[in-house]
Image (spheres, coloured by chain):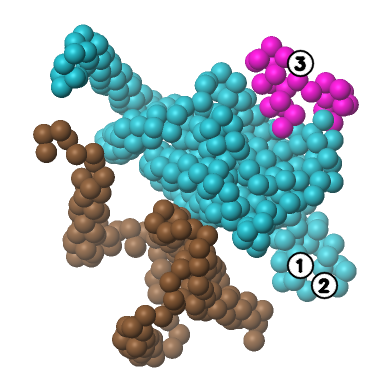
Amino acid sequence: MTAEQLLFLAVGAVTLIASILVVTSPRLVHAGLWLILALAGVAVLFVLLENGFLAVVQVAIYIDAIAILIIIVVMLTRAVMRETDPQINRTWVLAGMAALLLFGSLLAIVLQLPAPIRPALLDPESGLDVLGKALVDVNGFILPFEIASVLLVAALIGAIVVARAPMRGD
Amino acid sequence: MSDPFGGLDNFLKDLLVGFGLDATFVAVVLKLLGAAVLGGMAGATAILLIWAERKLVARIQDRLGPNRVGPYGLLQTIADALKLLTKEVLIPAGADRIIFQMAPLLVVASVIGVWAVMPLAPGLIGSDVNVGLLYIVSVGSIGILGIMMAGLSSNNKYALLGAFRTVAQMVSFAVPLIFSLLVPTLLAGSMGMAEIVEAQEGLWFIFLAPLAALIFFVSSIAEVGRAPFDLMEAESEIVAGFHIEYSGMAFGMFFVGEFVHAFTISALTAVIFLGGWRGPGAEAFPLLGLVYFLLKASIMFFVVIWIRGTFPRIRIDQMNAFNWKFVTPLALVVLMVTAVVDKLAIEQGWPRFLAHSTANLLMVIGTLAILRAQASSARRRQEVALEAPVTRPEVA
């Protein structure tokens, strides 16, 4: 076992522990911070797999945008310093089953893959080109890409409509 | 003399391997050493920067500034740092101890982390990742996290309010910041910092994209939270904002983080828009490139201080309106126009410069015309409101 593999396992363990703490910590803000640690752990795993692009995107999107928004929402909607509601509610059995199902299907997919895979993206220079061109290629992913952008514009306009002060005529 | 940094690297490698160490281990040690030197230097500049800023702001305000400790007061900051170090770090009752203590570290780390991709001189760059600009943006977000943790864990209403303001401001101004960073990406055809400097051979990007440079500079100042955007620590409103409960060196870390951040954005402007280490003779003598880079960064830092010394603080609603109604739409327009113009002007050199400068000039004229029309319509509405009789409130 090389030093790199040891590091990979250690970072993976930290990520796993952090993600367990996300659901077990009693305070919502702490849960949000543990979520950030788990997402950062995934970013480090990307670095160890020699894909700097995915690592940077992971930090930019998940930590910069999503996790910080989650914490802002928590801070704005709850009494920040208070212990909140009990950890478990009535639907925990169903939620656990759904999580197990998801984990099982992901495991099945991973086990079906041929053992040593090196996707095109692992090549840092040409991989990015391939990704960028595939996103705007008619034979590639242009339809999902455009649908996603229309969805985002709709969400933007929706946010403005919800947040706007009612006009006097309304 | 052609490659002093590579030479130094080879010398150290040979020395350590000569001691009988494993070559891969030596590579790791040298990387750690480089990171320590770069981070240490970036942190240590704070001592000089704080002195320079105090002196310059004092001159702008017709004062003398620090002039008692050492020649020209040069040792004043060291005395202040020693005082902070000897003070107790108080942790308020009811605070979240671990988060409270981690917050200043994250703020400083996020600032120093940017220097990892800064091309200091030809061949002298910590790590030439091909998505350098994206890396800068995402590392900067960790600073937002640190500030939020500080405000949240302090168990103080002013700290929480300051954190809210800070996060609102930093998240808002990240939008035009990223848009304005996409313009040099378009022009250079790369997000790597070293390649952006390479692409500015002959013509700096500030001549091709002056508006993008201005937007980048203004939103960077807002991102640092310097005057006129220092409403997150407005003394008259919320005392000191997110760092109100911090004392001793824990407060000192925030302070150092802010000053290094201000110099970092100056250096980023120098690298992305002013050609970085480019200058006469820099290719042949890399050390000269380092001098050019520091000179350009210092000039931009002077502008940052100049702005701080001359502009009054804006209110939070003015900050939000300025960002969302003015800077962000303008940045979007600049990005789209630059993309189209750069596609049309295929030829490098003068045709490209002329096309871009004409487009920028037209955008400036258009912006000024829109602003003038809006101002006059607002003035007319105000006049109507003033003329309305007070006895009929339904009219007003």
Q: Residue placed farthest to the front in the image?
A: B391
> Mark 1: few, some, or many residues within 10 Å (few <14, many ≥20)?
some
- In the image, residue A50 lies at what x, y percent? 52, 69
- Label 2 close to label 1 by CB (< 8 Å): yes
Task: Give the Cα distance between marks 3 and 1.
Answer: 50 Å
Kind of element beneath mark 1:
helix
What residue is disc 2 on? B21
Range covered by the magenta-colored residues: B50-75
Specify whether residue A105 is in view.
Answer: no
- Chain colored brown: A
Name the chain letter of the residue that bears numbered label 3. Answer: B
Q: Nearer the viewer, residue B379 or B275?
A: B379
Of the pair A94 and B273, the residue shown nearer to us = A94
Mark whose residue sits in front, 3 or 1: 3
From the viewer's perspective, tell me whether residue A153 is left or right of residue B350.
left
Which residue is label 3 attached to? B64
- Residue type beneath disc 1: Val
- Image quadrant in which you'd find residue B42: top right
Residue with the mark numbered 1: B26
- For image coordinates 57% across by 41% down, the residue present is B241
Residue B61 falls within the magenta-colored stretch:
yes
Which element carries disc 3, helix, strand or loop?
A: loop
Which residue in the rendered view is the most extreme toward the left?
A169
In the rendered image, residue A168, in percent from the top left (x then y), is placed at 15, 33
Residue, x 75% and y 65% (percent of image)?
Answer: B29
Q: Which amino acid type is shown beneath numbered disc 3?
A: Leu
Q: Earlier in the sequence, mark 3 or mark 1?
A: 1
